[in-house]
Image (cartoon, coloured by chain):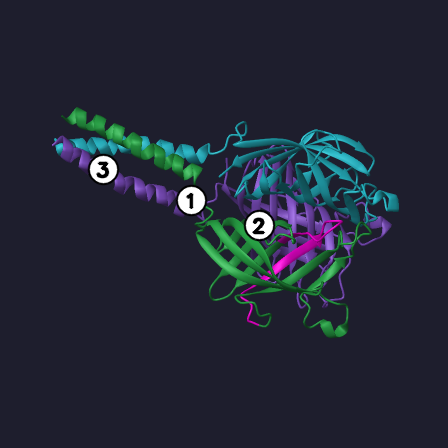
Chain colours: A green, B cyan, C purple
Amino acid sequence: MTIFSQKSCFIILALIISPSVSATRASKFQAEKPCKRMVLYYHDKLFDGTDKDKANATSATVVNASKLGNSYFGMLVVFNDPITNDDKFHSPPVAKAQGFYFYDRKDTYTAWFAYTLVFNSSEHKGTLNIMGADLMTEKTRDLSVVGGTGDFFMARGIATFQTDTFQGLYYFRLKMDIKLYECY
Amino acid sequence: MTIFSQKSCFIILALIISPSVSATRASKFQAEKPCKRMVLYYHDKLFDGTDKDKANATSATVVNASKLGNSYFGMLVVFNDPITNDDKFHSPPVAKAQGFYFYDRKDTYTAWFAYTLVFNSSEHKGTLNIMGADLMTEKTRDLSVVGGTGDFFMARGIATFQTDTFQGLYYFRLKMDIKLYECY
Amino acid sequence: MTIFSQKSCFIILALIISPSVSATRASKFQAEKPCKRMVLYYHDKLFDGTDKDKANATSATVVNASKLGNSYFGMLVVFNDPITNDDKFHSPPVAKAQGFYFYDRKDTYTAWFAYTLVFNSSEHKGTLNIMGADLMTEKTRDLSVVGGTGDFFMARGIATFQTDTFQGLYYFRLKMDIKLYECY
């Protein structure tokens, strides 16, 4: 009886453990089930070069566009941009986005971003590091959250960009849907 | 009897569960067994500044070399380069590589890359984000695939570069051996 | 009896397996227990533009600061900096740091880094890829180790910066406390 019971145990164990372990590997992340999600607004107010814009501007062109094409190919902007919970530029920022983007297509507008979301509020302290292509002609586009620190220790995930509005080169607002799939 | 059987269960459980879990940690990835592998060719055709090169060029120097050393230290190139399945520049691209590189050594040629492979074909839709040092004097050199989106959701891995050919500064071709070890 | 024993097994199994699997997920990494740790010193000796500095300089300004603010907003530096085990610039380097940083704040000094630690010694061969914000006004600040190659195959972790000393713009030394939480 005892022996039989142990054998049953083995079989049951095999059935229970194997799928659970492989399931952990195969479907470790489910796109629809992030462990943390934040919808944030990113405001980029590009310096127009005038003295009166210095107080408001949050980013500056540091490398001018090349002569390749007519869509700012190579123009590089460094930013320290406010991140808000709603779409208002003057709402209190919940984070700053520090980094850069540059335009990288000859015939239409696409950009490439690398930046850090720096959180220093009562709600979150820490950073998220993000990089990827901003294919501006797509309604939504996904970048990678490649690491995190502080409250976001070792996080990974996806940052989905959506253009919320823009006024030429000098102001644009992105809705950033941050979905973390690794949280610790 | 029942009690004894339960104890046996415990012991067996401990033996079965512990090694399987630690094995998952220790050998989660094996360098020789990527879950996805793609050998691709990257073509960089640097804009020479002339009007007639505008149609063909796929990248442009946006920051000139500094005066430090004689190997282009600091020269920064933004690219939107075609990726093909074979080594022919005019083969239909299976992806685009959007990003930048810069030279970063005084006494010989080394570069640093950060870019996104953008796939938009019948075979793959999505992106891979890659960064790392291109130690051009080595036969092969490894960069990190730090994230992915779409078909490559949350991927990580290694991108091995090998110089396939080059013609001065104005054309070079890399064989990129992309090995993903995290696939979902 | 047997049936009862199997049921007990099930219950015990559920109790044992569930927490162990979720524990693997929830506390996979513990901040105080990296699988690999290295305390290294990073020396940045910025080229001052004179011929006599060419031999010693390890980095160069390749993009000048914008006119936004008074703290070098947008100034971009490419570096190939020695990494030593102690705080002496002339100690034999155990690695090189290849990458760039730029200043990104109008009213005080903060920077953003992306670089590769290139190890090529008897102790370590391989690279670590790192990116993140350097909030220079904080005593310590964390960046992300987003990938690794060679001996650091697929590594991830945290790089904690601490300013060890600085002499204006032209020399600074960072203590980099590299903690890896994913090692293979």
Circle 3 sits on which residue?
Answer: C10
Q: Secondary structure at mark 1?
A: loop
Tell me the quadrant of the picture where the N terminus of chain C can be found.
top left
Q: Nearer the viewer, residue C36 or A11?
A: A11
Q: Is residue B86 magenta?
A: no
* Residue that lies at the very extreme toward the bottom in this rendered image: A52
Which chain's residue wears label 1? Answer: C
Q: Secondary structure at mark 3?
A: helix
- The structure residue drawn at horizontal position 77% and vertical position 48%, both measured from the top left corner, is C57
Q: Amino acid at mark 1?
A: Lys
- Label 2 to label 1: alpha-carbon separation: 26 Å
Which chain's residue wears label 2? Answer: A
Residue C91 shows in this picture: no
Circle 2 sits on which residue?
Answer: A142
Tell me if mark 1 has few (under 14), some (14-19) or many (20+) residues whose alpha carbon lies within 10 angstroms of its own.
some
- The structure residue drawn at horizontal position 43% and vertical position 50%, both measured from the top left corner, is A33
Tell me if mark 3 has few (under 14), some (14-19) or many (20+) residues whose alpha carbon lies within 10 angstroms of its own.
some
Circle 1 sits on which residue?
Answer: C28
Assess whether mark 2 and mark 3 are in contact (beta carbons under 8 angstroms). no
Q: Amino acid at mark 3?
A: Phe
Q: Is residue A111 magenta?
A: yes
Q: Which region is colored magenta?
A: A91-114
Q: Mark 3 or 1, which is nearer the eye?
A: 3
Which chain's residue wears label 3? Answer: C
Q: Amino acid at mark 2?
A: Asp
- The part of the image, by quadrant, that contains residue C129 is top right
